[in-house]
Image (cartoon, helix red, strand yellow):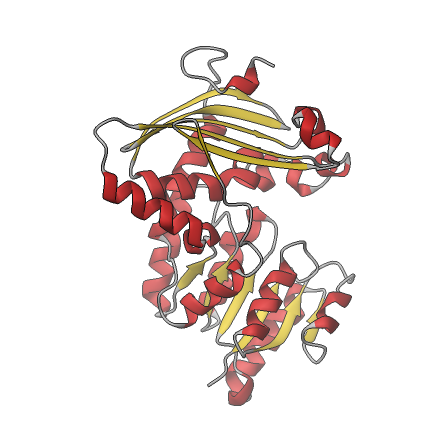
Amino acid sequence: MSKNFALIGVAGYIAPRHMKAIKETGNDLVAALDKSDSAGIIDSFFPDAHFFTEFERFDRHIDKLRRFTESQEVDFISICSPNYLHDSHMRFALRSGAGAICEKPLVLNPWNIDGLKDIERDTGQRVSTILQLRVHPSIIELQERVEREQAGAKYEVDLTYITARGKWYLQSWKGDEKKSGGIATNIGVHFYDMLHFIFGELQENVVHHSSETMAAGYLEYENARVRWFLSVDYKHLPELAKAQGQRTYRSITMDGEEFEFSGGFADLHTRSYEEILAGRGFGLEENRVAIETVANIRNARPVGLKGNYHPFLKE
């Protein structure tokens, strides 16, 4: 039986992946909200969905469906709003009698997870999250390999992710640390979750550099020592990537061997939705280590070029 969905943040960058996943899993989008009315993308997926630019009217509509229109009562609310609003919008979803499906980062601070767990208990509804790298075939294969090998020595890992952004980035909510959580939260949280998923519990977290556009540090897990580097600045791209006209560079090496996982991203949201609808989605606790990681990075005092730092920092 198909489910009814509502979506908050439908005009944003990630929303089309959610609408595609809702459609490909055979479900329906009945209502959508965004303060921006540049939401014509809805027509590509669910042209009959009701659309609102004011939260109060959206709230009233969701409540009306729940009380008076059983056939269109909302089963899930998908949340694609700016990071700092995720917590509030998940609370709204649960209190509206719907499950919440939230984009990363789940929340900005780990204590928000505890509050959401209380509301889950009060409402009987559940938060599910998009941790799409956990369903990536190559990541699953690597996790199984690490578990199988259980080497005595820890793996030496370098994680590099550069995704060049224009001048608009720092002028948007993404450039406001109070709203986005900063660069490590905004573009790095899914990588930290991936590292925890593959290499086990986090044991040490050191920040070497942190700014509006670039951050770098060292993380030690049960089975790996990881040097990481994140940037949204074009100048940090390797020359070869620039020469090829690329604005994104993603690299993970493990004991000097490049780990390739650039492909296979197109259907990860749909795969995530399939798992959630089957009752196997990732919940609040699966997010805790990654959220603790980014919160600690945000609040840390960078130590500079000391210890085991990423080689890009020298450059």
Residue 278 screen position, x and y as percent: 38, 72
Question: Viewer-proximal residue, 183 or 216?
Answer: 216
The residue that appears at 54% across and 64% down in the rendered structure is: 78
Residue 305 screen position, x and y as percent: 49, 11
Q: Quadrant of residue 223?
A: top left
Residue 160 screen position, x and y as percent: 53, 31
The residue that appears at 63% across and 55% down in the rendered structure is: 14
- Total number of numbered discs in the rendering: 0
280 over 222 or under it: above or below: below
Residue 81 screen position, x and y as percent: 61, 55
Question: Viewer-proximal residue, 242 or 65?
Answer: 242
Question: Viewer-proximal residue, 208 or 275?
Answer: 275
Q: Quadrant of residue 212?
A: top right
82 over 201 or under it: above or below: below
Drawn side of residue 185 relative to residue 173, left or right: left
Question: Viewer-proximal residue, 149 or 14?
Answer: 149
The residue that appears at 42% across and 43% down in the rendered structure is: 194
Which residue in the rendered view is the most extreme toward the top? 306
Is residue 113 at least partly visible in the picture? Answer: no
Is residue 68 at least partly visible in the picture? Answer: yes
Q: Quadrant of the C terminus?
A: top right
Drawn side of residue 242 relative to residue 99, left or right: right
Drawn side of residue 267 relative to residue 235, left or right: left
Drawn side of residue 207 relative to residue 187, left or right: left
